[in-house]
């Protein structure tokens, strides 16, 4: 095959797809709207507000819990003091009982009463022993025991209130932890959505810049009367057009994607398949490898 002859007869131009900045911008806005960033931010902020309200409620619960703790400590202190008082009085009664039993004292009183008044002091002493012990036992049985029952009941109720409020505080803290976990998840969703949005804007700007560079090139300008009429000049013009386009084609992955997308309908209408090959039962689409550096 004569290469020079084939080159001289090369009279094909690559038509660059029409690009509408407004259309690209509208597509960007639609894609950003589908991300629902505002709704996700509102959800995150609502969770944050719930956390703040819960924390304020928890602080009130904690203050009252501290108050109940103080009441429990005071009740326990009073109960302990009353037990000490009862123990002290019980020891006095025990000492008196060890010294002289009530029966023994009564017998001595009867014996002394039969005597003539020369033992008046001893008689009064024995009666005083009996009165002190009876008063002590009566005070121990009636007054102190009743006070002890009241203080014991108060202490039990105070401890029960502390336990109940401790459970409320633990439940409230667990709710705050769940809300904080939800907030972290919602915040992560917002961050991801914003990152996607920023990436979309970046690709949009790159695409606009890429197409602006291509369209600014006279090789891709719309076909006008300025195209050479001389066959040799026309072949050179077409050859330069294709070479210039293929340089950009090999350089920009995004250009290949956009160019293929804009020509899908035309390719399907002309060839019946997107890769320009005729389809048959054993046909397999060729694999075109791409690198991660090429896509960036």
Image (cartoon, helix red, strand yellow):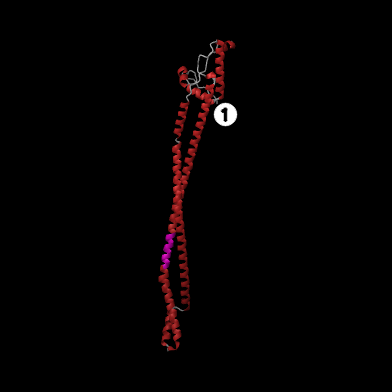
Left or right side of 139 for 243: right
How many marks are shown on the rendered structure?
A: 1
Query: Height in image: 237 above or below 200?
Result: above
Identify which residue is drawn at 44% across, 80% down: 128
Q: Nearer the viewer, residue 125 or 49?
A: 49
The local secondary structure at tag 1 comes to: helix
Magenta region includes residue 148: yes
Q: Nearer the viewer, residue 99 or 47?
A: 47
Q: Position of residue 212 (x, y in %)?
A: 52, 24
Q: Position of residue 29 (x, y in %)?
A: 46, 31
State the image quarter where residue 294 is shown. Answer: top right
Q: Residue furthest front?
A: 226
**In which quadrant will I find the C terminus?**
top right
Question: Is residue 67 in view from this perspective?
Answer: yes
Identify which residue is drawn at 46% across, 44% down: 48
Q: Position of residue 54 (x, y in %)?
A: 44, 48
Q: Position of residue 105 (x, y in %)?
A: 44, 80
Q: Main secondary structure of the magenta part?
A: helix
State the image quarter where residue 129 is shown. Answer: bottom left
Q: Which residue is mark 1?
A: 293
Q: Nearer the viewer, residue 200 or 129?
A: 200
Magenta region includes residue 58: no
Mark 1 neighbour density, 10 Å: few (under 14) some (14–19) many (20 or more): few
Chain part drawn in magenta? 147-158
**In which quadrant will I find the N terminus?**
top right
Question: Is residue 171 in view from this perspective?
Answer: no
Query: Height in image: 38 above or below 178?
Result: above
Q: Nearer the viewer, residue 83 or 197?
A: 197
């Amino acid at each position: 095959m004569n290469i020079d002859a084939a080159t001289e007869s090369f009279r094909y131009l690559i038509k660059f797809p029409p690009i509408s900045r407004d259309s690209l911008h509208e597509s960007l806005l639609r894609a950003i709207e589908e991300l629902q960033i505002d709704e996700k931010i509102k959800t995150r902020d609502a969770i944050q507000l719930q956390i703040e309200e819960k924390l304020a409620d928890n602080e009130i619960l904690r203050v009252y819990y501290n108050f109940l703790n103080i009441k429990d400590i005071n009740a326990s202190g009073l109960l302990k003091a009353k037990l000490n008082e009862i123990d002290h009085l019980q020891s006095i009664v025990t000492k008196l009982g060890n010294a002289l039993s009530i029966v023994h004292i009564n017998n001595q009183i009867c014996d002394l009463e039969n005597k003539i008044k020369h033992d008046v002091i001893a008689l009064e002493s024995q009666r005083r022993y009996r009165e002190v012990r009876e008063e002590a036992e009566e005070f121990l049985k009636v007054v102190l025991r009743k006070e002890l029952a009241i203080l014991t009941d108060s202490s039990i109720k105070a401890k029960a209130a502390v336990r109940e409020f401790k459970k409320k505080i633990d439940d409230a803290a667990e709710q705050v932890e769940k809300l904080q976990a939800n907030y972290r998840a919602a915040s992560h969703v917002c961050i991801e959505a914003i990152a996607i949005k920023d990436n979309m804007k970046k690709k949009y700007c790159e695409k606009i810049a890429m197409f602006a560079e291509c369209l600014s090139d006279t090789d891709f300008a719309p076909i006008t009367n300025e195209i050479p009429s001389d066959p040799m000049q026309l072949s050179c013009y077409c050859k330069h057009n294709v070479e210039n386009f293929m340089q950009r084609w090999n350089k920009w992955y995004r250009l290949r994607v956009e160019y293929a997308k804009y020509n899908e309908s035309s390719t399907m209408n002309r060839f019946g398949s997107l890769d320009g090959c005729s389809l048959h039962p054993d046909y397999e689409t060729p694999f075109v490898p791409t690198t991660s550096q090429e896509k960036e």
